[in-house]
Amino acid sequence: MIAGLVAIVIITIYFCWLLYLAIIWIANDTKQSIGEITIPVSIIIPCRNEEKTIAACIDSISSQNYPKELVELIVVNDHSEDDTINCIIKNNRVKLIQLPSHLKGKKAALTEGIKNATHELIITRDADTISDVNWLRTIIDEQIKADADMLICPVTLKSENSFLNVFQRLEFYAFTILTGATAFIKKPILCNGANLCFKKSVFTKVDGYKGNDDLASGDDVFLMNKIAALPERKILYLKDLNANVVTPAEDSFKRMTNQRLRWAGKNTRNPNLWNAFTGFCILLANISWLFIGVLSVFYHELAGYFIIITTIKCIIDFLLLFLGSTFHKQGKALIAFPLMVVLYPIYIVLIAIMSLVIKPIWKGRSLK
């Protein structure tokens, strides 16, 4: 009985917080317009063993509807062991930087690229992303209007016909709503370095990734937190699919698990209290659902509580996924929602436990 009441309290807090963020998401829109004013920009792409994707990424940037003379494209090679370099040098507009032998990792590559950047405005991209021709102009247009210290831009997972792909996309839809809504209320908790815009002077002011450069993951979120701590800072979310980049989902359960472990591994070093609150709400809600579900098998008086928390949880989860899938124009993925109801709580609890004892592998490297 007490366990059921506690679970209902947890689920209610979870419901109210996510409903508030959903309402904030709905109430805020970035006006979609493409202006004529242009400013110079440096685009930084860190890469390691990206021979299969880097050419397409570079081509999508080179084909932008934007004056080429104002775009500095810097690719930083993090000791690739495949044919990545030959794929890069085929495009003569790219400034290729080799990461020094004593440095390694994404943060080191980004720092090296930003250090060598000519322009004040920086955009970071992942080497496996592609974008439409108005991607850059859309970001620049918003930056000119807003003069943001950091502009968080959307990321979409490429749609494929597999459950693993749909599973990851549904999770990403929720991330999209959490990212945008918390930025709208000036309490940002997430951003994605695969598509991130910020000022070089602000990056320098906060000492870049210093203080967390020993962690392989979190270049984006830790930088955002440092900028958020500045007085009168401006961190905005660009709710415009024209500013979107598309990246492939992980193609195996092992790779997906490694990626999630990287993400989870940085949480103990994340000082963002709103991030912690949201994360605990999500984790405790899913633990409660599992716990009461298992107990109700043995204690039938808990079955009513399980039905109540399942109903509350399904309503708010579906709302977030509906909003996210609508924004990304991938509504068909919601067909898998019933399976997600059962599988996601198990998955998220396992990831939380595994992150405490397992070091993930990325690009052939064991990570902290």
Image (cartoon, rainbow, N blue to C red):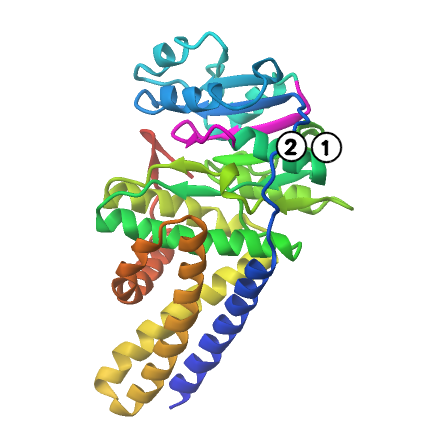
Region in magenta: 119-134
Of badges 2 and 1, nearer the viewer stands 2
In this figure, what is the number of numbered marks?
2
- Dot 1, how many residues are within 10 Å of its Cα: few (below 14), some (14-19), or many (20+)? few
For numbered disc 1, what is the local secondary structure? helix
The image quarter containing residue 28 is bottom right
On residue 47, which mark appears?
Answer: none
Residue at 34% x, 25% y is 53
For label 1, the residue is 205
Residue 309 percent location from the top left of the image: 38, 79
Residue at 62% x, 18% y is 117
- Dot 2, how many residues are within 10 Å of its Cα: few (below 14), some (14-19), or many (20+)? few
The image quarter containing residue 249 is top left
For numbered disc 2, what is the local secondary structure? loop
The three-letter code of the residue at mark 1 reads Lys
- Foreground pick, 21 / 6: 21
**Residue 156: within the magenta?**
no
The vertical placement of 71 against 291, above or below, is: above
Q: Is residue 310 left or right of residue 241?
A: left
Residue 248 percent location from the top left of the image: 33, 37
The vertical placement of 335 against 359, above or below, is: below
The CA distance from mark 2 to mark 1 is 30 Å
Residue at 66% x, 20% y is 119
For label 2, the residue is 35
Residue 181 percent location from the top left of the image: 57, 56
